[in-house]
Amino acid sequence: MRFLTPAALRGLDARALEDLLGRTELLIAAGEGEVSGLAAAAFLFADYAVLERGATLVTGDDPAIWAAAKWRLGRGALSLLLDERRRLTADETFSLGLCDELIDGDPEEWRTRWMRGRSALALDTAATLIRFRGGDALERAAFAQLFAIGEPQKGLAAFLKKRKPAF
């Protein structure tokens, strides 16, 4: 799993964005303030994107941002492209489906809470399967690996003991 903090988003260059697109692990991005340019593209390309409630997403005319919006929304990106608004509030960004969750406070604290009871290995496996459109053989191999190392058994044992799993 890779977590892009707001500072990491702002520090991206074109090469770093290209590297992110070739990843296999789960990518979570957190945005705050004004998210624009390459930061906006990386934010939209993330598997799970969270935005601070007071933030603004600036879509502009950057082709990388529109490619990312198309990746996230599919055909729904066309209506966004035709809309004249180029600055979206956090609420608008969420309602359009351009982010997955709105957060308050420190993104690192949010990530720590969000990961409680979640397996980073299972999330990475799921992200890879979704990104590469899986297929039966790849899914069977991925789940065989997870079961071989005991990842699901940890979750089941915690469930039966009525406690959160510790991955």
Image: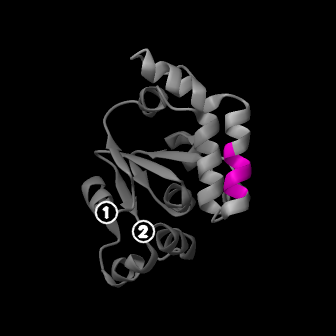
Instruction: Label the magenta part by its dominant secondary structure.
Output: helix
Q: Could you tell me which quadrant the N terminus lies in?
A: top right
Under mark 1, the amino acid is: Leu
Q: What span is colored magenta in the figure? A: 138-143
**Circle 2 crowding by C-alpha within 10 Å: few under 14, some 14–19, many from 20:** many
State the image coordinates of residue 58 (x, y, percent, origin top left): 40, 63
Q: Looking at the image, tell me whether mark 1 or mark 2 is earlier in sequence order.
A: 2
Q: Residue sitting at 41 percent across and 16 percent down?
A: 163
Q: Is residue 18 visible?
A: no
**Circle 1 crowding by C-alpha within 10 Å: few under 14, some 14–19, many from 20:** some
State the image coordinates of residue 40 (x, y, percent, origin top left): 49, 59
Q: Could you tell me which quadrant the C terminus lies in?
A: top right
Image height of 20 relative to 163, above or below = below
Measured in 3D between alpha carbons, the distance from the residue under mark 1 to the one under mark 2, in whole angstroms, is 8 Å
The residue beneath circle 1 is 88
Please name whichever residue, 122 or 154, is drawn nearer the observer in this view of the structure.
154
The residue beneath circle 2 is 59
Q: Quadrant of residue 150?
A: top right
Please name whichever residue, 8 or 167, is drawn nearer the observer in this view of the structure.
167
Q: Give the structural element (helix, strand or loop) at label 1.
A: strand
| Residue 141 among those drawn in magenta | yes
State the image coordinates of residue 79 (x, y, percent, origin top left): 33, 81
Q: Quadrant of residue 56?
A: bottom left
Q: Are marks 1 and 2 in contact (CB under 8 Å)?
A: yes
